[in-house]
Image: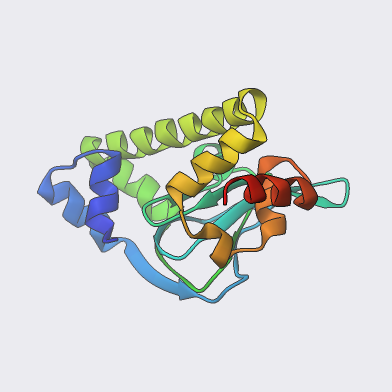
Amino acid sequence: MEFREIADSIFRLASSDLELLEEIVEEVHVPKNTKLIESEKISPYIYFQKSGICRIYYHKAEKEIILAFTFPGDALISLNSYIHVQRGYETIQSLEDSSLYRISSTDLQNLFLKSIGIANWGRKLAELESLKIEDRLMFRLFKSSLESYEELLKKAPNITNRIKLGYIASYLGISQVTLSRIRATKK
């Protein structure tokens, strides 16, 4: 997925603003298991997934709790770092070799001062990411494990071949045994 497509999916910019934004975008390639954003640290970058899969997780009582998976087109962002320039609670790690677009938060903040269009793009990005957090909360509160698993498979049909089943179980908030039972009913 090209950066222009991702940028347009957030907020359509005038071509001159899109060109300014593209000037600060850097494509990076990272190997599997790279931590792009780390908990308890201020993230100096925002990333957008070009290819690969990442996981967003936090630690709780010696366990990793997976909040979400990211796929091509998704933003990888610590909202605490982006909005408040404070340490975030999440870690974002590549689950396979990945290509990403990286933007320096400082460079982006400087563009916000130069262009109302880019400032609106940044606001819309924060709004969309906030809605994703709300979706995650609703997902945890109101969907059964089976419904959640089916929804994940719609988003990424071959995900069970690409990442550890333990990660999927953590994301669903269930044990691997329960996930195996759910998978058996889907065959």
Whether residue 90 is visible? no
Q: Nearer the viewer, residue 6 or 113?
A: 6
Q: Is residue 43 above or below residue 136?
A: below
Residue 61, position as x, y percentages in the image = 88, 46
Q: Nearer the viewer, residue 60 or 89?
A: 60
The mark total stands at 0
- Residue that sits furthest to the top in the current view: 142
Residue 119, position as x, y percentages in the image = 30, 37
In-image side of 42 versus 154 (left or right): right
Q: Nearer the viewer, residue 24 or 163?
A: 163
Residue 4, position as x, y percentages in the image = 22, 55
Whether residue 176 is visible? yes
- The N terminus appears in which quarter of the rendering? bottom left
Choose top left, top right, bottom left or bottom right for residue 48: bottom left
- Residue that sits furthest to the left in the current view: 15
Residue drawn at (56%, 37%), measured in percent from left and top?
Answer: 84
Residue 129, position as x, y percentages in the image = 46, 37
Residue drawn at (58%, 42%), measured in percent from left and top?
Answer: 149
- Residue that sits furthest to the right in the current view: 61
Choose top left, top right, bottom left or bottom right for residue 102: bottom left
Residue drawn at (17%, 56%), measured in percent from left and top?
Answer: 19
Q: Which color scheme does this rendered protein use?
A: rainbow
In-image side of 57 versus 6 (left or right): right
